[in-house]
Image (cartoon, rainbow, N blue to C red):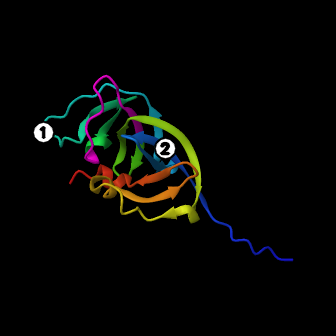
Amino acid sequence: MTDTAVHTQSKQYTTFLLGGLYLGVEVLKVQELIRHQEMTRVPLAPAVVRGLINLRGQIVTAVDVRRRLGMPDLATDTPPMNVVVITSDGAASLLVDEICDVVEVQDDQFEPPPDTLREGVADFVTGVYKLPDRLLLVLDVDRALDLN
Protein backbone atom coordinates (compact mmCIF):
# COMPACT_ATOMS: atom_id res chain seq x y z
CA MET A 1 0.00 0.00 0.00
CA THR A 2 1.15 3.51 -0.72
CA ASP A 3 0.84 6.41 1.63
CA THR A 4 -1.46 8.96 0.01
CA ALA A 5 -1.55 11.38 2.94
CA VAL A 6 -0.52 14.89 2.09
CA HIS A 7 2.27 16.16 4.28
CA THR A 8 1.95 19.82 5.14
CA GLN A 9 4.77 22.00 6.29
CA SER A 10 4.70 23.55 9.72
CA LYS A 11 6.06 26.85 11.01
CA GLN A 12 6.76 28.11 14.48
CA TYR A 13 5.70 31.55 15.65
CA THR A 14 6.77 33.59 18.64
CA THR A 15 3.49 34.98 19.94
CA PHE A 16 2.61 38.07 21.93
CA LEU A 17 -0.37 40.11 23.05
CA LEU A 18 -1.10 43.62 21.94
CA GLY A 19 -4.28 45.31 23.10
CA GLY A 20 -6.19 42.03 23.20
CA LEU A 21 -4.88 40.84 19.83
CA TYR A 22 -2.87 37.62 19.63
CA LEU A 23 -0.05 38.24 17.16
CA GLY A 24 2.91 36.23 15.98
CA VAL A 25 6.23 36.56 14.21
CA GLU A 26 8.01 33.63 12.60
CA VAL A 27 10.59 32.24 15.05
CA LEU A 28 13.29 32.40 12.36
CA LYS A 29 12.96 36.21 12.35
CA VAL A 30 13.31 36.57 16.14
CA GLN A 31 16.73 37.25 17.66
CA GLU A 32 15.59 37.32 21.28
CA LEU A 33 12.86 38.25 23.74
CA ILE A 34 13.72 40.65 26.56
CA ARG A 35 12.06 42.60 29.33
CA HIS A 36 11.63 46.34 29.19
CA GLN A 37 14.84 48.22 28.47
CA GLU A 38 15.68 51.86 29.09
CA MET A 39 15.29 53.79 25.85
CA THR A 40 16.98 56.91 24.61
CA ARG A 41 14.53 59.19 22.82
CA VAL A 42 15.35 60.21 19.27
CA PRO A 43 14.49 63.85 18.54
CA LEU A 44 12.35 64.36 15.43
CA ALA A 45 11.79 60.60 14.99
CA PRO A 46 8.31 59.41 13.97
CA ALA A 47 5.94 58.82 16.93
CA VAL A 48 6.14 55.04 16.42
CA VAL A 49 9.84 55.12 17.26
CA ARG A 50 9.91 55.12 21.04
CA GLY A 51 13.71 55.30 21.17
CA LEU A 52 16.95 53.41 20.93
CA ILE A 53 18.04 50.62 23.24
CA ASN A 54 21.55 49.39 23.88
CA LEU A 55 21.54 45.63 23.58
CA ARG A 56 24.98 44.53 24.76
CA GLY A 57 26.64 47.19 22.60
CA GLN A 58 24.25 46.81 19.67
CA ILE A 59 22.06 49.91 19.15
CA VAL A 60 18.52 48.81 18.32
CA THR A 61 15.54 50.95 17.27
CA ALA A 62 12.46 50.30 19.43
CA VAL A 63 9.19 50.55 17.49
CA ASP A 64 5.92 50.81 19.42
CA VAL A 65 3.65 48.31 17.67
CA ARG A 66 0.59 49.73 19.47
CA ARG A 67 1.20 53.12 17.89
CA ARG A 68 1.96 51.47 14.56
CA LEU A 69 -1.43 49.76 14.59
CA GLY A 70 -3.29 52.91 15.68
CA MET A 71 -3.97 51.72 19.25
CA PRO A 72 -3.75 53.83 22.39
CA ASP A 73 -0.48 53.72 24.32
CA LEU A 74 0.04 51.10 27.01
CA ALA A 75 -0.65 52.35 30.54
CA THR A 76 2.41 54.19 31.86
CA ASP A 77 2.72 51.81 34.83
CA THR A 78 3.01 48.80 32.49
CA PRO A 79 6.38 48.66 30.70
CA PRO A 80 6.37 47.05 27.26
CA MET A 81 8.32 43.90 26.42
CA ASN A 82 10.79 43.65 23.53
CA VAL A 83 10.60 41.20 20.65
CA VAL A 84 13.95 41.76 18.95
CA VAL A 85 13.68 40.80 15.30
CA ILE A 86 16.28 40.39 12.57
CA THR A 87 15.73 42.43 9.42
CA SER A 88 17.76 43.13 6.31
CA ASP A 89 18.72 46.44 7.99
CA GLY A 90 19.84 44.75 11.23
CA ALA A 91 18.06 44.17 14.51
CA ALA A 92 14.98 46.12 15.64
CA SER A 93 12.77 45.82 18.70
CA LEU A 94 9.00 45.48 18.54
CA LEU A 95 7.48 46.83 21.75
CA VAL A 96 4.54 44.63 22.79
CA ASP A 97 2.27 44.25 25.83
CA GLU A 98 3.11 40.69 26.79
CA ILE A 99 5.19 37.87 25.34
CA CYS A 100 3.44 34.50 25.08
CA ASP A 101 4.56 31.08 23.86
CA VAL A 102 6.04 29.66 20.71
CA VAL A 103 3.31 27.87 18.75
CA GLU A 104 3.60 25.48 15.85
CA VAL A 105 1.06 25.73 13.06
CA GLN A 106 0.49 23.90 9.79
CA ASP A 107 0.69 25.75 6.48
CA ASP A 108 -2.76 24.46 5.51
CA GLN A 109 -4.26 26.36 8.49
CA PHE A 110 -3.16 29.71 7.01
CA GLU A 111 -5.89 32.01 5.69
CA PRO A 112 -6.00 35.58 4.38
CA PRO A 113 -6.78 38.26 6.99
CA PRO A 114 -10.51 38.47 7.76
CA ASP A 115 -12.43 41.55 6.59
CA THR A 116 -13.43 42.19 10.20
CA LEU A 117 -9.95 43.38 11.25
CA ARG A 118 -9.73 47.05 12.16
CA GLU A 119 -8.25 49.14 9.36
CA GLY A 120 -5.02 50.02 11.19
CA VAL A 121 -4.44 46.38 12.09
CA ALA A 122 -5.33 44.86 8.72
CA ASP A 123 -2.55 46.85 7.03
CA PHE A 124 0.10 44.99 9.03
CA VAL A 125 -1.27 41.43 9.09
CA THR A 126 -0.36 39.00 6.30
CA GLY A 127 -2.85 36.35 7.37
CA VAL A 128 -4.24 34.29 10.23
CA TYR A 129 -4.06 30.80 11.64
CA LYS A 130 -7.21 29.40 13.23
CA LEU A 131 -6.14 27.84 16.51
CA PRO A 132 -8.52 25.85 18.73
CA ASP A 133 -9.12 28.75 21.12
CA ARG A 134 -8.30 31.91 19.11
CA LEU A 135 -6.91 33.45 15.94
CA LEU A 136 -3.19 33.97 15.54
CA LEU A 137 -2.58 37.10 13.46
CA VAL A 138 0.71 37.01 11.55
CA LEU A 139 2.46 40.37 11.83
CA ASP A 140 4.21 41.64 8.70
CA VAL A 141 7.49 42.64 10.39
CA ASP A 142 8.95 44.46 7.39
CA ARG A 143 5.84 46.57 6.96
CA ALA A 144 5.56 47.29 10.70
CA LEU A 145 9.15 48.53 10.72
CA ASP A 146 8.92 50.53 7.48
CA LEU A 147 9.01 54.15 8.65
CA ASN A 148 8.78 55.71 5.18
Quick one: SS at disc 2?
strand
Disc ID at residue 113: none
In the rendered image, residue 80 lying in the magenta stretch gets the answer yes
Residue at figure coordinates x 24%, y 28% from the top left: 40
Q: Residue furthest right?
A: 1
Residue 34 higher or lower than 86, as above or below = above
Q: Residue at x 29, y 28 (%)?
A: 75
Compared across the picture, whether 43 is left or right of 94 comes to left
The quadrant of the image that shows the N terminus is: bottom right
Of the pair 45 and 135, the residue shown nearer to us: 135
Q: Which residues are magenta?
A: 68-83
Q: Which residue is mark 2?
A: 15
Image coords of residue 132 (percent x, y): 58, 51
Quadrant position of residue 37: top left
User: In the image, which disc is placed on residue 44?
Assistant: 1
Amino acid on which disc 1 is placed: Leu
